């Protein structure tokens, strides 16, 4: 799923789980859980193909996706109802870490990141190639955003 969805769901985990270490672990694992559902992502082909002179649009997409996610967390979260702002943002960050590993693997490839990439993109994303309409691939993400906002507001 796109960063915005992972960020919001991670923040929701951070606001709902009162045990801080558990919240951090669950936020990290939530990434793999959400990626199990059919979803659509924007392309970052130039980063994947290491065409460095053309990566600006890809970097911009990632940056806007990230900023919008943080903005939505800031708008919808209420630090008085949980362990505070810090844990919400730490959990949001933990929830996008697996995608960070993927980007890192493009920049500095190594065995461990390669294994993680295989698990993340071939096993977890097993529905990627299946015939599921774009509509449902988007609706799934909208539902997760709505659930996350509800959890953040409680
Ligand atoms: Zn992912």
Image (cartoon, helix red, strand yellow):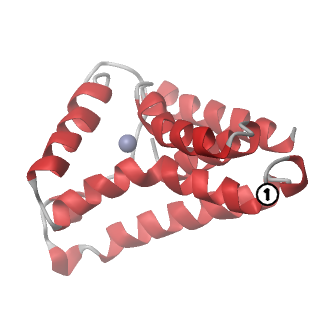
29 over 92 or under it: above or below: above
Q: Which residue sits furthest top?
A: 131
Position of 125 with respect to 75 (left or right) is left
Q: Which residue is mark 1?
A: 84
Position of 7 with respect to 40 (left or right) is right
- Foreground residue, 16 or 40? 16
- Foreground residue, 17 or 103? 17
Q: What quarter of the picture does the C terminus occupy?
A: top right
Residue at 90% across, 54% down: 80
Instruction: State the image quarter where residue 84 is shown.
Output: bottom right
- Foreground residue, 63 or 101? 101
Q: In what quadrant does ligand 1 lie?
A: top left
Give the x, y percent position of residue 64: 52, 67
Q: Ligand 1 near label 1 (Cβ, under 8 Å)? A: no
12 over 99 or under it: above or below: above
Instruction: State the image quarter where residue 9 is shown.
Output: top right
Please indicate, yes or no, whether residue 42 appears anywhere in the rendered image.
no
137 over 57 or under it: above or below: above
Q: What quarter of the picture does the N terminus occupy?
A: top left
Give the x, y percent position of residue 130: 28, 19
Please indicate, yes or no, whether residue 134 appears anywhere in the rendered image.
yes
Residue at 84% across, 56% down: 79
Instruction: State the image quarter where residue 117 is shown.
Output: top left
Give the x, y percent position of residue 129: 25, 25
Q: Residues within 10 Å of mark 1 (few under 14, many from 20)?
A: some
> Total label count?
1
Give the x, y percent position of residue 153: 85, 43
- What SS does tag 1 mark? loop
Q: Which residue sits furthest bottom?
A: 53
Residue at 32% across, 22% down: 127
Position of 25 with respect to 53 (left or right) is right
Residue at 59% across, 57% down: 90
């Amino acid at each position: 799923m796109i960063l915005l969805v992972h960020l919001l769901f991670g923040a929701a985990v951070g606001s709902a789980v009162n045990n801080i270490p558990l919240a951090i672990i669950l936020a990290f694992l939530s990434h793999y859980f959400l990626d199990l559902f059919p979803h659509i992502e924007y392309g970052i082909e130039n980063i994947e193909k290491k065409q460095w002179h053309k990566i600006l649009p890809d970097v911009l997409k990632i940056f806007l996706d990230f900023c919008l996610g943080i903005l939505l967390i800031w708008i919808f979260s209420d630090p008085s109802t949980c362990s505070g702002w810090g844990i919400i943002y730490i959990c949001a960050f933990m929830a996008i870490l697996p995608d960070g590993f993927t980007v890192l693997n493009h920049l500095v490839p190594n065995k461990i990141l390669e294994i993680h990439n295989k698990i993340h993109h071939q096993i977890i994303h097993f529905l990627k190639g299946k015939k599921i309409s774009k509509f449902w691939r988007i609706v799934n993400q909208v539902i997760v955003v709505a659930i996350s906002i509800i959890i953040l507001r409680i």
